[in-house]
Structures are given as C-alpha cells and as structure tokens.
Image (cartoon, rainbow, N blue to C red):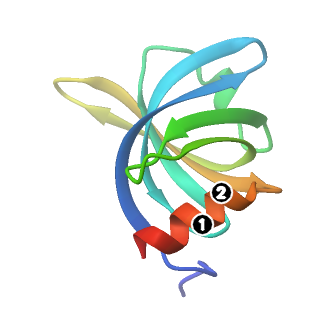
Amino acid sequence: MEKRESKRVSLSVDAEITTRGNSYSVSVENISQKGMCLVAPTSETVEDFIPGTTLGISFSAPTGEKISQHCEIKWLRIDAEPLIGLIYNIGMQAIAPPPIYNEVYMKLL
C-alpha cells in the first residue's frame, strides 16, 4: 500500500546538507509537498544519516529559487554499486518548509 500523501516530482539538483557540524554534497532526486529524497554517493560514516536526525539542506531549484530549510531523516537505504561504492538513499520530511518551497513544488507539478 502506498504511504505517500502527496505526489513526487522528479528532480536532479545538487544540494548541500549539514548535520552535527558536518557538510555533505548530495543530489535531490525528488520532492513532494512534505519532503524529498536525497542520494549521497559517499564513503562517509552512516552515523550522520540515522533516521530521526535533523539536518539543514540548501539547493537551487530548476526554477532559479534558492531553498534552505530543515528536515528530519525518515528513512535510509544503503545500496552498493559495483563501480561507485555505497550510495545512501535518504528520505526526508520537511520541518516547517518556507513558502518558497511549496511555490517551487507547485511550479514543478
């Protein structure tokens, strides 16, 4: 059964997340009204990506707007890619998203 409450919009933009004093380069793969999915090819420890962790994210939407907000990690899936190594797929829930976030989401629908 599908748990999603709103439609996902595919997106592939670079972003930066910060948590516990660390910064990571990631890619936003899709967004919805309430959250997003990130992909992080990384050799970093998984400790900064544990579900329940709050982090900041910043990215430029394809429509040109800059978005900065806080999110909570809801789930983490780790895949091993033979040529790349570990890839973290991170499901995030937006915490009080700024109005620009919802405006961008509506433009991308």
Give the distance between the C-alpha atoms of the residues marked 2 and 1, in whole angstroms. Answer: 5 Å
Give the answer, above or below, for where 14 lies relative to 107: above
Report the residue at 61% width, 80% height from top: 3
Residue 107 pos. (x, y %): 46, 70
Amino acid type, label 1: Glu
Image coords of residue 46 (percent x, y): 60, 24
Say which residue appears at 83% left-offset and 56% top-offset. 96
Q: At 61% across and 16% down in the image, what residue appears?
A: 23
Q: Nearer the viewer, residue 96 or 3?
A: 96
Q: Is residue 52 above or below residue 46?
A: below
Q: Considering depth in this image, is 14 or 48 the residue closer to the camera?
A: 14
Q: Given contact means CB atoms under 8 Å apart, are the residues at marks 2 and 1 in contact? A: yes
Amino acid at the residue labelled 2? Ile
Residue 13: x percent and y percent?
A: 38, 41
Question: The residue tagged with tag 1: helix, strand or loop?
Answer: helix
Neighbourhood count class around disc 2 (C-alpha, 10 Å): few under 14, some 14–19, many 20 upward? few
- Give the crowd class for mark 1: few <14, some 14-19, many >=20 residues within 10 Å: few
* Extreme-front residue of the structure: 64
Label tally: 2
In the orientation shown, which residue stands out farthest toward the left?
A: 83
- Residue in the image at 36% along x and 55% along y: 11
The numbered disc on residue 87 is none
Considering the image in quadrants, where does the N terminus appear? bottom right
Q: Secondary structure at mark 2?
A: helix
The residue at which mark 2 appears reads as 100
Give the image quarter of residue 57: top right
In depth, the one of 4 and 25 nearer the eye is 25
Checking the image for residue 103, the label placed there is 1
Which residue is at the far bottom? 1
